[in-house]
Amino acid sequence: MENQADSLIGRLSQSSLAYIRRLLFRVLSVGPIPNHLAFILDGNRRYARKWKLGEGMGHRAGFLSLMSLMKYCCELGVKYVTIYAFSIDNFRRKPHEVQGVMDLMLEKIEGLLKEESIVNQYGVRVHFIGNLKLLSDPVRLAAERAMKATSNNNNCILLVCVAYTSTDEILHATVESCEDKLSEIRSLGRLQNGEISPEKCGAAVSLADVEKHIYMGVAPDPDILVRTSGETRLSNFLLWQTSTCLLYSPKALWPEIGLPHLVWAVLNFQRINPYMEKTRKQL
Ligand SMILES: CC(C)=CCC/C(C)=C/CC/C(C)=C/COP(=O)(O)OP(=O)(O)O
């Protein structure tokens, strides 16, 4: 009886919170809503140390925050959410730590495919972005399955950057653009002696060619980049895409991030949006 009463109170408080959130989002929607939010999930290990949790528990708590935030973003009408889940440099961490994050990732990607997951409840399409060849077979295959299974969802798009760094992304896009250009030149029969200098090929490559091959080409540039734990570095994340975006670095560790941070970020975006629009037009 007591348990039933507890769960009824729990459900009621959940639904009143959801109601207050809807009202809040309606007020926020009077102003412009960002189309794309990007997050650097910093501070998971520090959170585990702060609360004397076991190793890996910080990343687990971080995943829960990610799911709540994803839900709020969908409710608010944000179309794209990008997260820096694992950088190429993170592979240099202690092997058991890398393994811990990869095991968690595999478990959570499989969880995303379940019917009751936020991805399915909110119609989220998932993209994995980065040098996916660097992932172990089970993680890469799970990522591919998730991309395929959610490919018809179009309410909101979650871009998970794994085995990603911006410099690797730019290098990869540049090489592919040069290869494209080379085969284009070859097919037009413009090669006299079968050789072309790298300088000539490079000169023929345009900005649009590179952007066609950039991993993040599936999304517009972010409007806001949030890095938690008070750090103000970009750490090789979305360098190509953040020239005009608002940066916000709350003191909260990633597992502590919540609705107030999202609301604050959106209010700041709304305050500077007229100026940002002008800068974008001048580019
Ligand atoms: C399926 C899916 C999307 C899973 C995501 C799982 C998740 C929360 C990954 C975060 C991994 C990571 C290296 C975060 C950075 O915190 P940190 O370890 O650098 O912590 P610190 O800043 O305190 O050192």
Image: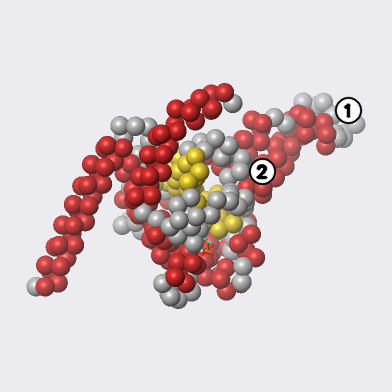
84 over 211 or under it: above or below: below
| Residue that badge 1 annotates | 192
Between 75 and 195, the residue placed more toward the observer is 75
Badge 2 residue CB within 8 Å of ligand 1 = no
Neighbour tally class for label 1: few under 14, some 14-19, many 20 plus, Cα within 10 Å:
few
Residue 245 in view here: yes
**For residue 111, above or below residue 33:** below
Q: How is the image coloured?
A: secondary structure
Q: Is residue 123 visible?
A: no
What residue sits 66% from the left and 49% below the top? 168
Q: Label 1, secondary structure: give it.
A: loop
In primary-sequence order, the first of circles 1 and 2 is 2
Q: Note whether 137 is above or below 96 in the view shown.
A: above
**Which label number is shown at residue 22?**
none
Tag 2: amino acid? Ile
Viewer-proximal residue, 4 or 22? Answer: 22
Q: Residue 216 at what x, y percent from top left? A: 56, 42
Q: Which residue position holds label 2?
A: 170
Q: Specify the amino acid type for callout 1.
A: Gln
Q: Are marks 1 and 2 in contact (CB under 8 Å)?
A: no
**Quadrant of the rendered image containing residue 255:** bottom left
